[in-house]
Amino acid sequence: MNIFHIVGARPNFMKVAPVLSALKGRKNVTQTLIHTGQHYDASMSDVFFQQLGIPDPDINLAVGSGSHAKQTAEIMVRFEPVVLERKPDLVLVYGDVNSTVATTLVCAKLGVPVGHVEAGLRSFDRTMPEEINRLVTDQLADLLFTPSEDGDENLRKEGIPAEKIFRVGNVMIDSLVRLLPVAQKITRAGLPERYALVTLHRPANVDDSATLKEILGSLLEVNRDLSVVFPAHPRTRQRIADFGLHPGQLRLLDPLPYIDFLALQTRATVVITDSGGIQEETTYLGIPCLTVRDNTERPVTVSMGTNVLVGRDRDKLRSEFSKVLSGKAKKGAVPPLWDGHTGERIADVLVGPS
Ligand code: UD1
């Protein structure tokens, strides 16, 4: 079987690594890794390949940044001839980024089967570009690999036949389980003993100057009690500069490599984020997570894990943060099948048990 794997943006890389590795050496499998080039900075891409042990992509479509329409269209235009020439039997797409939906659309029109890894997640918020990507990808995919029960339910409600849905668990946690021992050995010089780890990059949080100013204000308040360590996405750093905002005493860092960021998570007193994957990683690690969003497509991190949605409500952030400081943070459990073996379960579905 000739399998394509599509990656494009930072959160795809920790998801593809376990599947590539599980399929490696299985009988009659040929794998082709395609990077769309959606993320292109070394700190957002290359270093993840190195640390996760992912081979160099066989093909890089080098699309770069652009508006949603431009980026999505450019990926489609550059990907279609590759499919026509190399004729994959199956294309695996990951997560919910523009690269995921663009390549799925191309395959659907050419009659090439698609498997979606991390299917069924829904925030029910169509103002999020990722929600649109998830809805379209899941409607078109032929095999849907879900991380948790809510994913199966969402898909069934959208009319996806049960035989297409495979609950395999959380593939990103495979990478975490594998590299956690390495991360635990890393110490980063110059960091305080206790700190709040922050990431922000959602357009809804960083693209509007008043909203970003308000969030930075809340973080400066947090920083009075606990040092804020803030590895900033290029988009966020750019917006802070564009809007003439002042991060004051917040420790802004460049984006960190996977293992270095994992190391920071494991030692954080609390994580404050608007990322999807970090809500899951903190749940696995049992670290309190305050999510600066009104909704989440990963509700199991709230119902079972350590995640609390604080939205953009400064009072809610303040009160949840106080609970953490006084040792009353929510305790959580690890959801079923978040066990480090999801990649193997996906490989079993695709080619049978090894
Ligand atoms: C994308 C994903 C988002 C994911 C995030 C993780 C979509 C719709 N969004 O958002 O779901 O959580 O990746 O990082 O696919 N930029 C650089 N260097 C890079 C990449 C981007 O400087 O290597 C800057 C550019 O100014 C670019 C902006 O970041 O215009 C946004 O990049 P883009 O890929 O459009 O979306 P992300 O915000 O990264």
Image: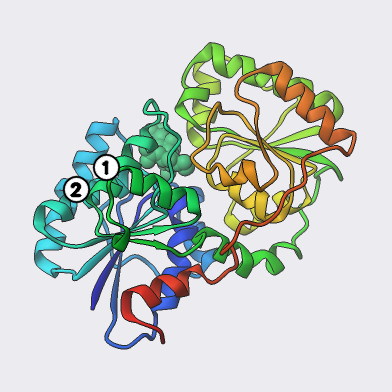
- Give the percent coordinates (x, y) of residue 257: 58, 54
Q: Is residue 274 visible?
A: yes
Which amino acid is tagged 2?
Leu
Q: Residues within 10 Å of mark 1 (few under 14, many from 20)?
A: some
Of badges 1 and 2, nearer the viewer stands: 1
SS at mark 2 in the image: helix
Sooner in the amino-acid sequence: mark 1 or mark 2: 2
SS at mark 1 in the image: helix
- Give the percent coordinates (x, y) of residue 314: 69, 17
Where, quadrant-wise, is the N terminus in this rendering? bottom left
Q: Are marks 1 and 2 in contact (CB under 8 Å)?
A: yes
Q: Classify the position of ligand 1 by quadrant: top left, top right, bottom left or bottom right.
A: top left
Where, quadrant-wise, is the C terminus in this rendering? bottom left
> Badge 1 is on which residue?
136
Nearest the viewer among 67 and 305 is 305
Give the number of callouts: 2
Q: Residues within 10 Å of mark 2 (few under 14, many from 20)?
A: many
Disc assigned to residue 105 = 2
Q: Quadrant of residue 60?
A: bottom left
- Give the percent coordinates (x, y) of residue 266: 74, 53
Gap between marks 1 and 2, in whole Å? 8 Å
Q: Residue at x 78, y 57 (%)?
A: 187
Which amino acid is tagged 1?
Val
Looking at the image, is 150 positioned above or below residue 323? below
Q: Quadrant of residue 293?
A: top right
Nearest the viewer among 87 and 324 is 324
Q: Is residue 10 visible?
A: no
Report if the beta carbon of the residue with label 1 is closer than 8 angstroms to ligand 1.
Answer: no
